[in-house]
Image (tube, coloured by chain):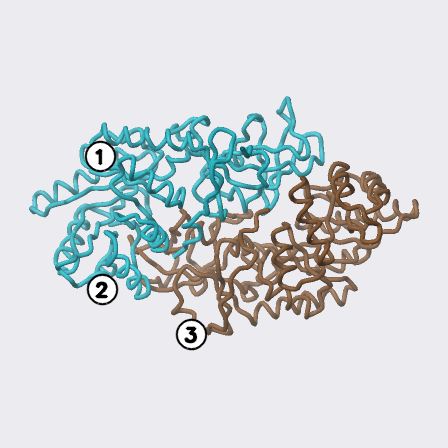
Chain colours: A brown, B cyan
Amino acid sequence: MTHYSTLDTPSVLIDLDKAEANLRRAQDAANRAGLNLRPHIKTHKLPFFARRQVDLGAVGINVQKLGEAEVMADAGLTDILLTFNIIGAAKLARLKALHERVTIRVVADSAECVAGLATTFTDPARPLGVFVECDTGMGRCGVQSPEAALDLARRIVAAPGLEFAGLMTYPAAGKYKQAAEWLAAAKALFDAESIPVPAITTGGTPDIWHMEAAAGVATEYRPGTYIYMDRSQVAAGAASFEDCALTVLATVVSRPTEDRAIIDAGSKALTSDLLGLVGHGYVLDYPEAKITGLSEEHGTIDLSACAQKPGIGDRIRIIPNHCCPVTNLFDRVYLLSGDNLVETLPVAARGRVD
Amino acid sequence: MTHYSTLDTPSVLIDLDKAEANLRRAQDAANRAGLNLRPHIKTHKLPFFARRQVDLGAVGINVQKLGEAEVMADAGLTDILLTFNIIGAAKLARLKALHERVTIRVVADSAECVAGLATTFTDPARPLGVFVECDTGMGRCGVQSPEAALDLARRIVAAPGLEFAGLMTYPAAGKYKQAAEWLAAAKALFDAESIPVPAITTGGTPDIWHMEAAAGVATEYRPGTYIYMDRSQVAAGAASFEDCALTVLATVVSRPTEDRAIIDAGSKALTSDLLGLVGHGYVLDYPEAKITGLSEEHGTIDLSACAQKPGIGDRIRIIPNHCCPVTNLFDRVYLLSGDNLVETLPVAARGRVD
């Protein structure tokens, strides 16, 4: 048995029991709410967990980039929603190749995007499913009104090789009621025009335990971070530190002063993501420790409030602010049962930027 | 000839002519100041540029992790300074293996660190060179006083398999005078005790054009970012946007409103590093554009101040806030001469976290 503390640092540890509990809790909540669950794999980037999510009841997976879809299709995942506008000939060709071997559907929020899809996909016998992305308050992609959603859906319906799949949104954290109202207004508009809306898909881990509030109008929920949880989700009230399955293992490499520790995990391990938080992570066993600064390879910890202080060579575990981009920085992760190593997995979809 | 605009996005473009000019300018400045130049390869992580830096006159290279040193040694680099405390049996064994095939030297800032090295390296015929790291104002690693530097140097001198290599610091940006004073005080102390200080190595791109201020006491300068430069270095006055050799190529994938563009480069391409700046990069050709937000795969741009606005499908080039961690996010970079692709290089030392 390999104890995690013997692994080299920095490294990413995944507590399998906590991850499994998080997966089951969300699937149960979706079942109770009558929603399909479609987990976003950007958080783990691992076929291992994508398959587990499907085994537990997920209807398929959500990815953000073609490269992620390709990795997951290679690994045997067969129902993939790619929630990103696919623009340009090179990406359309890759999407077409994927469409020939798995069920893949995409989103669009503009006539330009639909036009590119309509030119590439022309076979009414095997149409590409396209959702209209709706900006329900996030201020990122998406049509700006239910009327614009209807207009764009008409373009999709009019394209012989495309199929209108429904409405998709990524709601801003905490704005799940606003998102539900937006989607309900859009649904009413589509109903009045007798245009069927096969699915309405929403998501987000920050509001995952309010999933039932989406259920009145949505048919599907797409959380990502919920599998691991992180410090930002604890701050949002979606998890406790006990629920957090991903930790970064680091070594104290310097204790230059009584109150300062330097660890071998900097922004290249923890990322610079703050997500509105102060400090760069939560240190297990040293809850009063404050990670006050990161450079690429060094983390600076203020120990002034700590009764016990780690010494040079000691290992510490950190719950990062945001677990998803941490996964993207490591070539492999270590799966643990309790304190012991079960398996080492390559992060198959790491670095799939396009 | 492949024009950069035909490359898929997001991707990293390196302007070879600008990089070469940056390398030459720094080597010339070091030559004039009478300083050895030892470039930090964390910025490019490419044997290609490490060799070029040595060809132009660098005495060797600087790395931050053992994994980087291993990649560079494999690529034929023979003089490597690893400016990170090496702690623990696994890393000491890797360091020993490196020491057997190249000239590698390290730093230490504690008795514990020196003790680990002294136990591993025991051959007086082939001693390991060890610098004492000095905290001259950065507040990261390093002994806290010249007296502490002297004490630690005595421990190194006393270890049969170690060789005191000198003093090392990474000065805080803008504090190069303070760093030089600190090092001069330490040097005076060592001189008074008749302990030779073979080298004094300092660094940093923000103050690179003040290199001559270090020359009175330092013998070596270790800049990293200078090869590519970035928005933070422009803000620090060390470069102009014209000098910046690294850009991230992105595609506009959505124009949800008149003033908002969404690109396919988010924090997974540009990183969340702010380094005290407002916004997430400088957009070439659209200098009034403001990158106001990043999620992992989306960048949000405020175009309200722009006379011309890019449309869906348009390519834009961004000078990131901090180029070094961008390099770490991509498996490959594209080398350009002018607008044309010259070569595609794997980022050989990417993701070497330990």
Closest to the observer, A12 or A138: A12
Location of residue B5 in the rendering, given as x and y in whole percent from the top left corner:
58, 33
| B53 versus A308 height, above or below | above
Which mark sits nearer the N-terminus, 1 or 2? 1
Q: Amino acid at mark 3?
A: Thr
**Quarter holding residue A10:** bottom left
Indicate left or right for B276 with B189 as reference. Answer: right
Q: Is residue B171 above or below residue A279?
A: above
Q: Is residue A312 visible?
A: no
Q: Which residue is mark 3?
A: A2
Q: On what subunit does the disc labeled 1 rest?
A: B
How packed mark 2 is, by other alpha carbons closer than 10 Å (few <14, some 14-19, many 20 or more), is: some
Q: Say whether residue B188 is left or right of residue A296.
A: left
What residue is rendered at 88% in x and 46% in y? Answer: A190
Q: Determine the secondary structure under disc 2.
A: helix
The vertical placement of B41 against B207, above or below, is: below
* Foreground residue among A307 and B105: B105
Q: CA distance from mark 3 to mark 1?
A: 48 Å
Instruction: Identify the image quadrant of residue A148.
Output: top right
Say yes or no: labels 3 and 1 on the same chain: no
Check the residue under mark 2 and report the chain it is in: B
Label 1 and label 2: CA atoms lie apart by: 32 Å
Residue B11: quarter of image: top right
- Residues under labels 3 and 2: Cα distance? 24 Å
Residue at left offset 55%, top offset 26%: B287
Q: Disc 2 residue type?
A: Thr
- Image quadrant holding the C terminus of chain B, namely bottom left
Tag 1's secondary structure? loop
**Which residue, given by chain and number where applicable, does mark 1 sit on?**
B35
Q: Do labels 3 and 1 touch, CB within 8 Å? A: no
